[in-house]
Image (cartoon, rainbow, N blue to C red):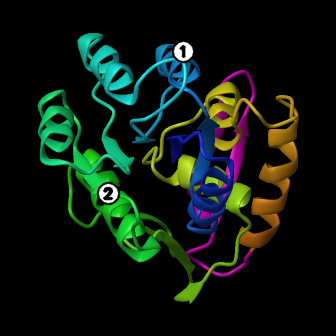
Amino acid sequence: MRILLVEDHTELQHWLSKALRDANLSVECADNGADADSLLLTQEYALVILDLTLPRMDGLEVLKRLRARGGKTPVLILTARGGLEDRVQGLNLGADDYLAKPFELMELEARVKALLRRSVGNEAVVYECGSLRFDTVSRMFSYFGENLQLTPREHAVLEALITKGGKPLAKEKLFDQVFTLADDANLDAIDLYIHRVRKKLDRKEPGAAAITTLRGIGYLLQPAEAKA
């Protein structure tokens, strides 16, 4: 899942983006309201974490424009402006949650997970493909009953595929879910991560999962026996 973090404090932005990536989330960052507004016009995100006091465009204006366009992306306001008037205004403009600075990282992570679960429409969705399971609450993969060790981008690849529910995913769409605009990568980089994930899924016993390449269509995660 890709998150947009809008925060103009460089050190805090770096710290938060690292923590979110450690939680197996793909993070795009913006340090001003105008850039955030432009990204929300052209990109899809599972969640926006939005500061209010931003250069070039106030965070409340970013939120107002997003909702005026019909955008339904969940928004978590994260700001030092913790007064009642600001909270009420943000919630009235369509924010889904509000966390005042300073805050504990554990609380932020819990609120992020809750908003992501809510956006899926279920409190505890578990996706399965053979013996491969993905728990949307813990955001962990298990394979044959054991935790599957993945790098953040390998995790993003496998999450994008398993949440398609047995339907193919175009290479371009997969790229958009794995990489951010700031990443120095081209479309062919997906092939490398597909190769790495395939190696970690390579098991011979029943219940194994496999990634199939559908030429001209994209990639499909399915039980290995179905591939055979």
Q: Residue at x 51, y 44 (%)?
A: 3
Name the disc covering residue 212, or none: none
Q: Residue at x 47, y 35 (%)?
A: 45
Residue 214 shown in magenta:
yes
In front: 118, or 66? 66
Q: Residue at x 42, y 67 (%)?
A: 109
Q: Is residue 22 above or below residue 219?
A: below
Amino acid beneath label 2: Ala
Q: Is residue 66 above or below residue 28?
A: above
Amino acid beneath label 1: Ser
For label 1, the SS is helix
For residue 63, which quarter of the picture? top left
Quarter of the figure with the C terminus:
bottom right
For residue 61, which quarter of the picture? top left
In the image, which residues are magenta?
203-226
Residue that carries the numbered disc 2 in the rendered image: 100
Residue that carries the numbered disc 1 in the rendered image: 38
User: Is residue 136 at all visible to an observer of this figure?
Assistant: no
Q: Position of residue 33 (x, y in %)?
A: 50, 24
Label 1 vs label 2: CA separation?
A: 25 Å
For label 2, the SS is strand
Name which of mark 1 and mark 2 comes first in the sequence: 1
Q: Position of residue 137 (x, y in %)?
A: 36, 69
Q: Is residue 174 above or below residue 108?
A: above
Q: Is residue 217 left or right of residue 188?
A: left
In front: 63, or 198? 63
Residue 137 shown in magenta:
no
Q: How many residues crowd around disc 1 within 10 Å: few (fewer than 14), some, or many (20 or more)?
A: few
Q: Residue furthest bottom?
A: 146
For residue 123, which quarter of the picture? bottom left
Q: Position of residue 113 (x, y in %)?
A: 36, 62
User: Is residue 64 at all visible to an observer of this figure?
Assistant: yes
